Amino acid sequence: MTRSHSLPCIPDAPRSIRKGVPLKTLLGSEAVDCLARNVRFVHPGFDATSFRKKALSGLEDLEFLPRGQHIAVALRQFLPDAYRNALQILLDSLTPPQTEADEFGLAEFFYLPHSFFIASYGIDPEYNGGEDPFDISMNALHALTTRFTSEFAIRPFLIQQQNRTLSQVMKWTHDQNPHVRRLCSEGLRPRLPWGKRIPAFIKDPSPTFPILELLKDDSSLYVRRSVANHLGDIAKDHPELVIETCRRWLSGNSSNDSKWLVRHAIRHLVKKKNGAALALRNSAT
């Protein structure tokens, strides 16, 4: 186990995926035990034994993402009924935040059930006694993304409450923590790998551009790489728009960082021998 003090902990895990080792093994019995221990540490009334039994029941047959959802459902059953109270317990059980722009290793996927918990129960007032849970859910996403990532959990909010969520994301673009700033781009990607697609942004990506404009010159490569990947998503459906945007960005800033971002953003178009992308790549070298 990896520990900050005695608790909370996260299970040990490699930095990257290993050939022949299924990713789903990250959310096995060790992760469930660690989660139960962390929650009980901050909430002594938590029935860790019953939670463990429920969480492990049927877990072996599930793949990675369904395992996260399955464990989140078990948490829902054994945490307080009020979402606000249950969420606070989960937040209290988190490890300390990370402030450096290092990419997380696989160990932090331990927090995938927390992500599913917020996405599943933090939107609809039906689960919240009629109370609007939006603000506390946004605060939770902010906290979670400094330990793992909230790029998956924020997507249902963007789908169901787009304007409201975009307004919050815009505020986060000025956050001191690079993990939060990265979320502003990564969480809004129209075709995020593993994440729910955002049909509205696939059809019309323009709502995300003000955010990308603010982040394109971010001090952190971690954030700029996400901006490039975001543009790469958009290029799959709107190649002309991405090429036009990259040209404009280069005309305003011809630094090596900007050139790298543009080359990374159009790399898939280049592979497809898109003439405009090939010309743009040559101008960005």
Image (cartoon, helix red, strand yellow):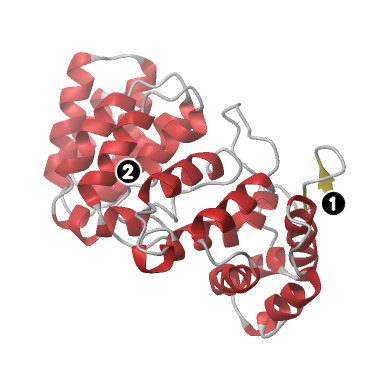
Badge 2 local density, few (<14 within 10 Å), some, or many (20+)?
many
Query: On residue 230, which mark appears?
Result: 2
Kindly tell me whether residue 270 is visible in this rendering. Answer: no
Residue 100 visible? The answer is yes
Q: Residue furthest right?
A: 6
Amino acid type indicated by mark 1: Met
Q: Position of residue 99 (x, y in %)?
A: 60, 27
Dot 2 falls on a residue whose secondary structure is helix
Which residue is at a point 38% across and 17% down the rendered structure image? 256
Name the N-terminal-most of marks 2 and 1.
Answer: 1
Which residue position is annotated with label 1? 1
Which of the two residues, 19 or 209, is positioned nearer the viewer here? 209
For badge 2, the amino acid type reads His
Q: Is residue 275 above or below residue 87?
A: above
Q: Is residue 191 left or right of residue 251?
A: right
Q: Nearer the viewer, mark 2 or mark 1?
A: 1
Point 61% across, 47% down: residue: 91
Would you identify the image quadrant in which residue 64 lies? bottom right
Label 2 vs label 1: CA separation? Answer: 34 Å
